Image (tube, helix red, strand yellow):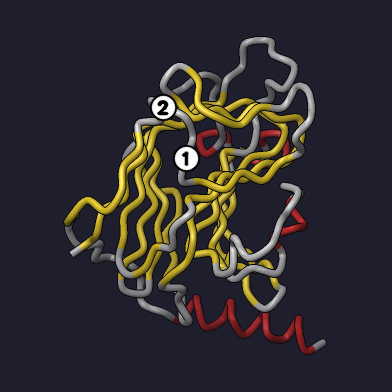
Amino acid sequence: MKSVLSVILLLAAGGAQAACEDWGRRGALLYQDDFDGPLTGYVSEYAKKPGNFVGTRDGRLVLDVDSGATVWLDRPLSGNILIAYTRRVVIEGGPNDRLSDLNHFWMARNATGKTRSGKFEDYDDLDMYYAGMGGNGNTTTRLRRYGGGQRVLVGERLGPEWLLEPNRDYQVEIAVYKGCTRMRVDGREVFSYRDPHPYTQGYFGLRTTWSRQTIDKLTIHEIN
């Protein structure tokens, strides 16, 4: 009962907050990667077996897996930041090709503190934000706040216009600024959320489940 009550109180507090309207201006470049060479500076968590591949290929980071996979940037982020990159869900008849799960974790605490298999439930104990576009076989697009063992749904988009298209290069942006967080795709806001207890530092992870996806042109900037 206590855990259910805490979820209700958190949702109520979030709904009472002012809307997120000011997103600052892009500042100094903190990090960039075009994935032109070997994958270094990341921690990859997935089932390492024949048929699964996580690494760089043809100038892109490739996640080609038959189950869950997360690739963490192996450095903590803090403060007001803007994460941007290009991402594609590949559908070309490959064994793992499935239109689903363009997912991310960000501001995750203790993300690299233990070894994980890549299974989704392995991450339930983290404090972080999670967004999944086209989850559950391309039927859901959701934003969750993880904390204290709870995965609270704080945003949801319904309708086909919020789901994935095959082989499309999506321009993804994730911002964290003054207690708010936002995800935009191709310049359109998918989610914005003012957190009454915001996460201001942690790790960023690229996440998927049973799919083949490519990532390119990753940049992280300060927001002023």
Query: Which residue lies under the disc numbered 1?
Result: 40
Q: Quadrant of residue 105?
A: bottom right
Name the amino acid, label 2. Answer: Gly
What residue sits 35% from the left and 37% below the top? 33
Label 2, label 1: how far apart the Cα atoms are: 8 Å
Side of 35 relative to 145 (left or right): left
Q: In the rendered structure, are the residues bearing label 2 and label 1 in contact, judged by CB atoms less than 8 Å apart?
A: yes
**Residue 80: horizontal and vertical position, in percent?**
30, 66
What residue sits 30% from the left and 48% below the top? 31
Toward the right, the furthest residue is 1
The 10 Å Cα crowd at callout 1, few under 14, some 14 to 19, many 20 or more, is few
The 10 Å Cα crowd at callout 2, few under 14, some 14 to 19, many 20 or more, is some
**Residue 102: horizontal and vertical position, in percent?**
57, 38
**Residue 100: horizontal and vertical position, in percent?**
65, 33
Q: Is residue 30 above or below residue 218?
A: below
Name the amino acid, label 1. Answer: Thr
Side of 125 relative to 82 (left or right): right
